[in-house]
């Protein structure tokens, strides 16, 4: 719950929202973390299936959707691999596949390139950009990497919990040009 003011997501005010309605809203969110948050004991196909199974899809439907998402992130050939067998960039692509598997309205990205080298970071940003173009979802990205702001539609800069800048990016560039 917000400590003050109002918070609205997907045209729903969150102040005082009930547990079941909040759970419904969570189904419209995809999460990409800096540290990937993959389950090491599960192969990557099963990791991508997780949000679909939680949502109540059958194993067959979840598996087909997971394979489709792994194809989008160019990892279908590693569907039977386990996270520790993958590079950091590959693990982040699995994280993205898992986040988009349920076709979220909003994709929340917490430092999605923070643990990656420059070239891998650029590939991940291009992938996030492609996902946005393909599915039209809203992407909220938190980062300390100032260059990423150049690919954003809107930039909100925070310091000490306060908004310092909030503007539309009039000179947006593709991730490939970062």
Image (tube, rainbow, N blue to C red):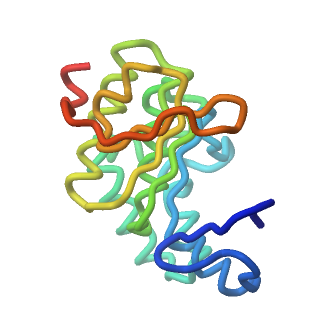
Left or right for 11, reference 123: right
Identify the residue shown where x is 55% and y is 53%. 31
Q: Is residue 137 left or right of residue 159?
A: left
The picture quadrant where one finds residue 27 is bottom right
Q: Quadrant of residue 107?
A: bottom left
- Which residue is situated farthest in the right direction here? 3
Question: For the N terminus, which image quadrant?
Answer: bottom right
Q: Position of residue 119 (x, y in %)?
A: 33, 15
Label total for image: 0
Q: Quadrant of the C terminus?
A: top left
Task: Give coordinates of residue 137: x percent, y percent.
Answer: 34, 61
- Could you tell me residue 20's position as x and y percent? 71, 86
Residue at the image point whose x is 20% and y is 25% from the top = 176
Residue in the image at 65% along x and 68% along y: 6
- Specify the quadrant of the image occupied by residue 7: bottom right
Examine the rendered structure and indicate whether residue 114 appears above or below residue 44. above
Q: What residue is at 54 percent from the left and 57 percent from the top? A: 46
Residue 108 in the image: above or below residue 125: below
71 left or right of 36 in image = left
For residue 167, above or below residue 137 = above
Q: Position of residue 110 (x, y in %)?
A: 57, 39
Instruction: Tell me if 14 is positioned left or right of 62 in this view.
Output: right
């Amino acid at each position: 719950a917000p400590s003050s003011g109002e918070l609205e997501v997907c045209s729903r005010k969150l102040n005082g929202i009930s547990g079941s309605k909040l759970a419904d809203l969570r189904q419209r969110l995809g999460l990409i973390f800096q540290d990937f948050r993959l389950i090491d004991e599960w192969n990557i196909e099963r990791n991508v299936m997780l949000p679909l199974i939680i949502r109540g899809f059958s194993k067959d439907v979840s598996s087909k959707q997971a394979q489709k998402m792994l194809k989008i992130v160019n990892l279908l050939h590693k569907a039977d691999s386990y996270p520790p067998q993958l590079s950091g960039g590959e693990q982040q692509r699995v994280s993205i596949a898992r986040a988009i598997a349920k076709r979220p309205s909003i994709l929340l990205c917490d430092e999605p390139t923070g643990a990656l080298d420059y070239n891998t970071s650029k590939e991940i940003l291009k992938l996030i950009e492609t996902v946005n173009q393909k599915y039209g979802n809203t992407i909220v990205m938190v980062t300390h990497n100032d260059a990423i702001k150049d690919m954003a539609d809107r930039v909100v800069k925070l310091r000490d919990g306060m908004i310092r800048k909030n503007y539309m990016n009039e000179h947006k560039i593709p991730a490939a040009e970062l």
